[in-house]
Image (tube, rainbow, N blue to C red):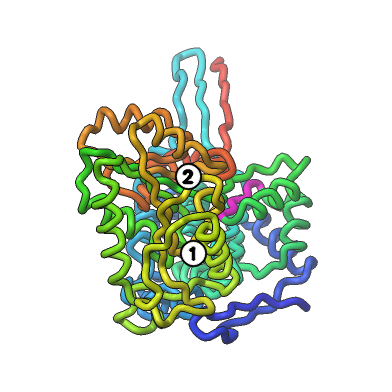
Amino acid sequence: MSTVKCISPIDGSVFAERPCLSQNQAFAATERARAAQADWARRPLQERIDLVRAGVAAIGAMNDEIVPELAHQMGRPIRYGGEFGGFNERASYMADIAASALAPTQIEDSDNFRRLIKRVPHGVVLVVAPWNYPYMTAINTVAPALIAGNTVVLKHASQTLLVGERMAAAFQAAGIPEAVFQNVFLDHATTSALIAANSFGFVNFTGSVGGGRAMEHAAAGTFTGLGLELGGKDPGYVMEDADLEAAAETLIDGAMFNSGQCCCGIERIYVNAALYEPFVAKAVEIVSGYKLGNPLDPDTTLGPMAHLRFANEVRAQTAEACADGAKALIDPALFPKDGGAYLMPQILTDVDHSMRAMRDESFGPLVGIMKVNDDAEAVALMNDSNFGLTAALWTQDYTRAEAIADQIDTGTVFTNRCDYLDPALCWTGCKDTGRGGGLSQIGFHNLTRPKSYHIKKA
């Protein structure tokens, strides 16, 4: 029997280990979910909403245990207090809008005809969640899927394998039947076999581009709906009229927070020539003040990356860029803890798009900064990427910002902020970042299908 292990980035020890389900056990779990779905969907919408809210509250009650547990699993410093704020915000918003988002579209209700379109659940939804924000990314789909009347099977990343257990236990304790929300441990082959066998009405995957391709391959010919949030290389653009202090502080935090392991983290920054030098100086000042160390230490501001191989990929991108002429601005002497999964932050200048550090996803505490002369140059560079999740613009001219935003191939455009997921807006991407959309009313639409009713009255 295969197992899934969480290797703690704090010290390389095995923090948790669980046996994977056999294929027979996995198919039995999905059959339980399928058998339970109709009864769950027949429950009143308000009852489902109330049960999901209760499950969310149960997670909140565990937060004191969850915060250090996350530090052990994926390295985020305890000083940041976990994810419950965003977890609760997203679930609560989806609960708040459920009645309107799922309401039938009334076309006609006359003496002769009643015509309408209802939203009906897909059935069983598989959620494959990532480790970087393990609670918030999972709840994006779990909450609206359950509210809409689907049953949910959750498969979490091995790096955060305890998260799925906690979520399922909390929601079941709140009154959601065990078959309606199941946490499972699966290897890749079993996951693919379940998808290929048409076990799910919808699959939501957040992870790598390679993982997304594997999901599409497994689903080929089944007509299973897929929601895919994959890689990113999100840009920031600082215009000549930007608030320099706010732009530097926010963009650098967007690049470095969570050791750079954010889906919509900033990985490349373009700065108008008029502000380039002071922006770079401020960025170096900010990053030089970070403390890299054990995430269980309240003074630590930057913890280890979740896994040694992730840190080594960022090291490789940095070394290649420097060999090709980039300049590394952060002094290694400021970060004596650097080594293994503990990776010092770095800012690169004299970079260009021939370098992997400006082209491939880094997903670590590394950002390249380039000087630009005008909006056209900035737009061309921002669009010169295989990815398209978010972009962040910095200016006091909001009309100009929106005109630039219209030209950027991406899922979300921020102005004077970054690295934030607004649950009222659709979370989506384009190009190799994937397809589909979560949260907002569109999230409910993607987790249901339209069903038309045409009634001729006698």
Q: Residue at x 58, y 31 (%)?
A: 451
Q: Quadrant of the N terminus?
A: bottom right
What's the residue type where badge 2 is placed? Leu
Q: Is residue 159 visible?
A: yes
- Where residue 186 appears, as percent x and y from the top left, is 69, 67
- Where residue 316 appears, as percent x and y from the top left, is 57, 64
Q: Residue at x 70, y 77 (%)?
A: 3
Asked which quadrant contains residue 456, the reply is: top right
Question: Quick one: SS at disc 1?
Answer: loop
Provide the residue designation for mark 1. Answer: 132
Magenta residues, as a range? Answer: 201-206
Q: Is residue 202 magenta?
A: yes
Question: Quick one: SS at disc 2?
Answer: loop
Q: Residue at x 46, y 32 (%)?
A: 104
Nearest the viewer among 108 and 217 is: 217
Q: Residue at x 30, y 33 (%)?
A: 401
Q: Is residue 266 visible?
A: no
- As measured in the structure, the alpha-carbon distance from the residue carrying label 1 to the one carrying label 2 is 16 Å
What's the residue type where badge 1 is placed? Asn
Nearest the viewer among 422 and 367 is: 367
Provide the residue designation for mark 2. Answer: 389
Q: Residues within 10 Å of mark 2 (few under 14, many from 20)?
A: many
Is tag 1's residue or tag 2's residue first in the polypeptide sequence? 1
Nearest the viewer among 239 and 51 is: 239
Residue 126 left/right relative to 82: right
Nearest the viewer among 351 and 144 is: 351
Residue 334 left/right relative to 47: left
Q: Is residue 63 magenta?
A: no
Q: In the image, is residue 263 above or below residue 331?
A: above
